[in-house]
Amino acid sequence: MKAEIISIGDEILIGQIVNTNAAFLGEQLLNAGIPATRTVVVGDDPGEIAMTVRTALERADVIITTGGLGPTHDDVTRTAIASLFSSSLVFSPQVFEDVEAFFARRGRSMLPAHRDQALVPECATPIRNANGTAPGFDIQRDGRRLFVLPGVPEEMKAMMTDYIMPILAALSDDAIAVRTLLTTGIPESTLAQLLDTPASLPDDVSLAYLPSPFGIRLRVSSRDTDRTAATRRCDAFVDTILDRAGEFVFGEAPVTLAGLIGTLLREHGMRLAAAESCTAGTLASMITDVPGSSTYFDRGVVTYSNASKTDLLEIPASLIEQHGAVSAEVAVAMARGIRRSAAADIGISTTGIAGPDGGTDTKPVGMVWIGFNADGVSFACRYLFGNDRIRTRQRASQAALDLIRRHILGLPRSSSIVSETIHFS
Amino acid sequence: MKAEIISIGDEILIGQIVNTNAAFLGEQLLNAGIPATRTVVVGDDPGEIAMTVRTALERADVIITTGGLGPTHDDVTRTAIASLFSSSLVFSPQVFEDVEAFFARRGRSMLPAHRDQALVPECATPIRNANGTAPGFDIQRDGRRLFVLPGVPEEMKAMMTDYIMPILAALSDDAIAVRTLLTTGIPESTLAQLLDTPASLPDDVSLAYLPSPFGIRLRVSSRDTDRTAATRRCDAFVDTILDRAGEFVFGEAPVTLAGLIGTLLREHGMRLAAAESCTAGTLASMITDVPGSSTYFDRGVVTYSNASKTDLLEIPASLIEQHGAVSAEVAVAMARGIRRSAAADIGISTTGIAGPDGGTDTKPVGMVWIGFNADGVSFACRYLFGNDRIRTRQRASQAALDLIRRHILGLPRSSSIVSETIHFS
């Protein structure tokens, strides 16, 4: 079985918004075992919409459209669909009640245009909308299934998850088991070597390497008429990955590395503090994106100038002069300084050349020292992150978090992207 | 004239990546006066690719494809296109030289697969790739124009901007003048009231309100066979916007507010320092995303705990006890403390309830005080940003930057989203 996605809206065609809805639906359809073979984006034009849906119905078993169901004059999907099926619009008392209840909850009054939201093509079963006013439609025709959804992401997602996915599970002969492992601190090529893929990949398991600035995500999936068999094969290959490259896997989607660090720090009753130069707030921001991070993150400093390193971290000016601000010595002094200031268990620091200027032959743009200090442990690791300023700041922050993860879990420091490590007493 | 976009790649269909390329191309095509009427995403399947391109050639004057030009076995666009036009692949010495030069610059050695990148459909003119190995193709057929581009965003964007846009400008009968004004500190509805749109909008000028967490972007455009006329109308309406809501407009795309602040600080020879509680690094990170920010940004502190506010900013514990950490008094003390520590011209601070927990009736989740201190100026502004933790942190950081902009430019403090301002002597 196969599916097609039709995204409706001028704002997508002209690039005012990025088509994240199609990405969400594509992933869901894959998980349901009915992968999308085509996505089409068309504007708010009834003729184009009807023609595109008709063509899709000739090719695909399942079609999902999003967008154009709102109450304004450029929302034309409902009438286009009704006319395609020569169906009239009929008033649905249930949808009307839902719309009334929605406005009552928000304490807003209903406009006449909103009453029209209760008009439903006669050929369709309405899909109720818990998060907005526009209902979706479920239409069956000649063994094909057409779902018409609103374009507002939360409304669309809820209908997909709650209403459509169970139907697709029943429709599809295949079940797909999926697990997404999150790695960090290892390049794709090294990871592929460690995992020995594709050679070691069982025939009935798929593996995708999905790069991001924060690390490679590994999407493991298996497909079978028998869900248990699919799950077992998927789990078995996940175990293989963990055997071969487990130290690089920090969790499974949707956890973040900062979220995991938070859990670990809390479990161990440990407190963290950060001193940043080149990342300049990016690391603290990632740590504190996690709700409740104030329980384990005490403080941070952004010490851009040399004077600020001396003022806030008590680093002797002579040390900076001797080794340079971007050095293992200063990185460790920063980590020690902030740990002492906060009386924290772990002090972490970054100092490097974010670029685009300021690089030299021995200290090129993208070179970052990350300093670490905990009870009896002091070291600095050197990384080479490349030319992109923002990317380097993100990658350095992620690498800093990974050093904390490895310290708490008792894992060795990763050698795969660290170019040098210096220990201090 | 109209255009179609064809995005090629399984990874887009299954939602592994979001189709940002199509958004970029859609915006560019609109700017070129040849708007896209359809975007199609297909997988890495030669038959599907050829069929989709053939169908698009029947409808559109300009077709742009992206993706599937790399050196791996699932990159099949080149052969699909060659076979569609019954064209053989020929070796291009110039492309080969480009690929060789690319590897030389990176200090990497060329694999045999990369030599094949120099194979070009005989019917095509290669489009040179300054940022990667895969050339693009430019094919003319029956008055239609097909551009085949790689999927790597930087490579695709450079070819679109440098090679294709000048060709489209010559092709299009219409010129479109576009200017995008960036506003901050004002909600869409208030902005629409100030501008009195759509009532005040001239017939031949379009205006789009594009919301983002950082403010509303205003896209003004006008279309005409005469470029000068289009530009004049567009500029005239931009002047109207500046007359009516100029204080909220901080610049035109692609500047950022942090970038503008950097320019202003440099021009005035001023230095900045930041003390963050609820934004916790987000503000410093935004400031230092700007290359060269070390010339005007001296230092920042992330004072999450009360003890850190006392240690790093010399705020008396009694002041925090009396007013609470989230208060106008503490906000201003933080701004003063960091300004004094850095001997900077401007000290800025944030303290608030980012959520999801920690809110009370009088200090609800989303409430943020921003403190400001400069020579003879001390005040704090209160904002109510809503329930989303990350959004609140971003919006508070942007609001802090806007206070700096308004101070340097001598503009009044914005009243539209500030719920209260308290001045201190």
Image (spheres, coloured by chain):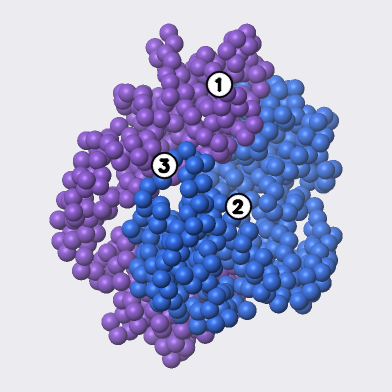
Chain colours: A blue, B purple
Instruction: Determine the residue positioned at 45% across, 34% down.
Output: B398
Residue at (59% x, 45% y) in the render: A394
* Cα gap from disc 3 to disc 1, whole angstroms: 28 Å
Q: Which residue is mark 2?
A: A213
Query: Which of A261 and B167 lies nearest the eye of the viewer?
Result: A261
**Number of the front mark, 2 or 1:** 1
A114 over A81 or under it: above or below: above
In space, the residues marked 3 and 2 are separated at their CA atoms by 46 Å
Instruction: Give the quarter of the image for residue A408.
Output: top right
What amino acid is found at the position of numbered circle 3 in the picture? Ser
Q: Chain of mark 1?
A: B
| Residue for badge 3 | A109
As drawn, is B131 to the left or to the right of A342?
left
Front position in the image: B66 or A352: B66
Check the picture and name the quadrant holding the N terminus of chain B.
bottom left
> Badge 2, how many Cα within 10 Å: few under 14, some, many 20+?
few
Residue appearing at x 69%, y 26% in the figure = A298
Q: Are marks 3 and 1 on the same chain?
A: no
Name the residue that disc number 1 marks: B362
